[in-house]
Amino acid sequence: MIQIYVDQISPRIEYAFEFIFGSRGLTYKLTEDKSEEVDLRYSNGALLSASASLPIASFMLNEGVENLSVEFGEFGKTECYTFNSVTDPVASIFFTLSRYEEYTCTEVDEYGRFPLSKSIIPKKWLTNSMCDRWAEEIISIVDPSLVVSKNEARMIPSFDIDNTYAYKLKSGKRKWMSILKDIAKFDFTRLKERREVLNGKISDPYDTFEKIKSITKRFPESKVFWLIGKWGKKDRNISIKNSGHRKLIKSLSDEGITIGLHPSFASFKNKETVKGEKKELESVCDKEISISRQHYLRFQASSTLKDLNSVGFVHEYSMGFAEHVGFRSGTARSHNWFDLLSNQSTDLIIHPFAYMDGTLREYMNLSQDESKTMIRQLFDEVKRYGGDFIFIWHNETIGDYGNWKGWSDVLDFTLSLANESN
């Protein structure tokens, strides 16, 4: 049992130490009793003279969100944050896990998201599991023998279904508008392809569901997130009212594949729309849907996560940046969402992802070989510090079609790393 003295047990302190010790299976106890013998003192008081001690940033005892003076300092062998001149690795963990900076930033990008450009996270930190590095440094000053040199990296592939098919099941105005658009562009290759798909001569280029099925059989923890929202400029999937579409989703669900909701672009800041989409997908799968990932990764920590939690989601998979690979919340370990506005840990579990296909090719402009190098770096970080190696692909991107020709090899490379996971 690891005994930790604090001047005051606060929700933020409890949350941080649960990540440091509890998530690693280490038993610990927080105490305010100055007379007890302890292994670590987290305090700015006179007791700080103990060999195993850490200073505390004052906001760890506060409620609400305040504008902090954040700089950078050194803790052991690792850089960490300094808050109002106090270098505090415990507070650094809380600040990062809770996404504190996203509550104080008023600027958003074109999709209403917190922009990476406004984050104080150094780019070099993003590909490091910083919260786990800080946690291990803290554990090492208590008892170096408790630091594990190698951890489990659980491989969890995930797929977003934004456009179920390129041509199949599309009818009416949408079908004819697409045809007219191809004619206007003199895109006869696409016109021919459409005709051959609809005549059954070739497969729809987005129909990669047999590959997804084979991957989920190999990796039962895989997740598939389906966009079923009403058609709009950024929500362009086939109607969920289409019987063929419903049949496909139900067939995957019936095979034991975990289906989650991909809340539509239009559902942003509209809890009732999210609730309706959840209910619709549950009617298709004939089971409760408890997992979600935002379309376009469009979420705000201060509001979206609260809405998802309130309508019954238990697991959330949007925690990552579209613009850059890595660990947005500083870890690959799942962790409960801490609601800064209510100053308490919630039962909504955040599952961070390490990379997304579009981030590699479209945002970072990496080649396939460069992507493999980056993916290996990320995987090695998770293998060293522990957690789930979650990554995002789309049914459109794994079929070697169009701009994604050859990219299925990058997915296959990622999956091959599972042989090195332990």
Image (cartoon, rainbow, N blue to C red):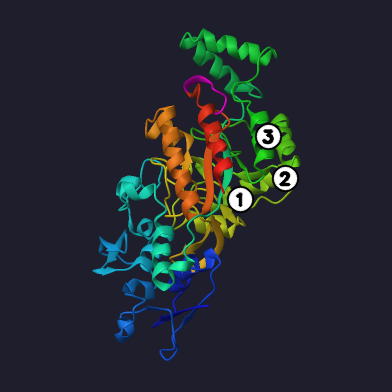
The residue to which callout 1 is attached is 291
Question: Secondary structure under badge 1?
Answer: strand
> Magenta stretch?
397-403
CA separation, marks 3 and 2? 22 Å
The residue to which callout 3 is attached is 213
* Residue 65 visible in this rendered orientation of the protein: no
**Residue at image coords 64%, 46%:** 221
Q: Which amino acid does label 1 sit on?
A: Ile
400 is within the stretch colored magenta: yes
330 is within the stretch colored magenta: no
Describe residue 273's horizontal placement relative to residue 301 as left or right: right
Q: Where is residue 322 in the image (x, y as percent from the top left)?
A: 42, 41
Q: Where is residue 367 in the image (x, y as percent from the top left)?
A: 40, 27
Q: Which amino acid does label 3 sit on?
A: Lys
Question: Secondary structure under badge 2?
Answer: helix
The residue to which callout 2 is attached is 283
